[in-house]
Amino acid sequence: MKLVASAFVAMLMLTGCQSAYYAAWEKVGIEKRDILVDRVENAKESQEEAQEQFSSALEAFGAVVAFDGGELEEVYDRLNGQYEDSVAAAEDVTARIDKVEGVAEALFDEWQEELEKYQNASLKRDSASKLRETQRRYKSLMKAMRNAESKMAPVLSALQDNVLYLKHNLNASAIGALQGELSTIENNVAQLLRQMNAAIEESDAFIASMKN
């Protein structure tokens, strides 16, 4: 499900309050469960996009280290652009994970409260069991997402250092000084991609469980 609603979304943005936001969606038949699935899908997409972006940044850094004539400023501009795009990609990943967390907390609070409304003990036990299982899957998902998120910082830090160094030392000797940094960044990016793949797999599993 993709929540696309133009004017309706604009109205929801004006409410400001999360409870009003969810209540407005519920009036048109979209429950917190649906919103959670949608946000997990969005978070997954942002991580896939971040994987591509960080891979591109690594490629740009490799081009700097392999520089062998031409316009050095153009090589620097490309690396700087890739760094800035990587920062934006990382911020998007964090924002979307935070949104998953927000709706999940609201869903679980509501689910727990509504257990007290049951008159049928058997149905109550079954619902409580499903809540615990969903929470377990969710915790595993969030752990994977946050682990992947944490791997972005070392890459961004290394890229920033090298971009700053190159900015103020735009010459061939500076390129030589950066060559030793390549393997470190390659390792950091490789760890990031592995963690993101794990988070993406967890996302797929969680989405499938919510749709069953």
Image: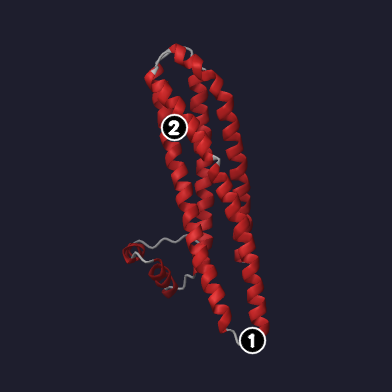
45 sits left or right of 144 in the view: left
The residue tagged 2 is 82
Q: Which tag is nearer the camera, tag 1 or tag 2?
A: 1
First along the sequence among labels 1 and 2? 2
Q: Residue at x 47, y 70 (%)?
A: 30
Could you tell me residue 209's position as x and y percent?
Answer: 63, 63
In this rendering, does residue 161 appear at all? yes
Could you tell me residue 178's position as x and y percent?
Answer: 50, 19
Q: Label 1, label 2: how many angstroms apart (C-alpha)?
A: 58 Å
Residue 70: which quarter of the image? top left
The residue tagged 1 is 120
Which secondary structure lies at badge 2?
helix
In this rendering, does residue 67 appear at all? no
Q: Amino acid at mark 1?
A: Asn
Could you tell me residue 174's position as x and y percent?
Answer: 45, 15
Q: Residue at x 58, y 79 (%)?
A: 115
Q: Residue at x 61, y 37 (%)?
A: 191
Which secondary structure lies at badge 1?
loop
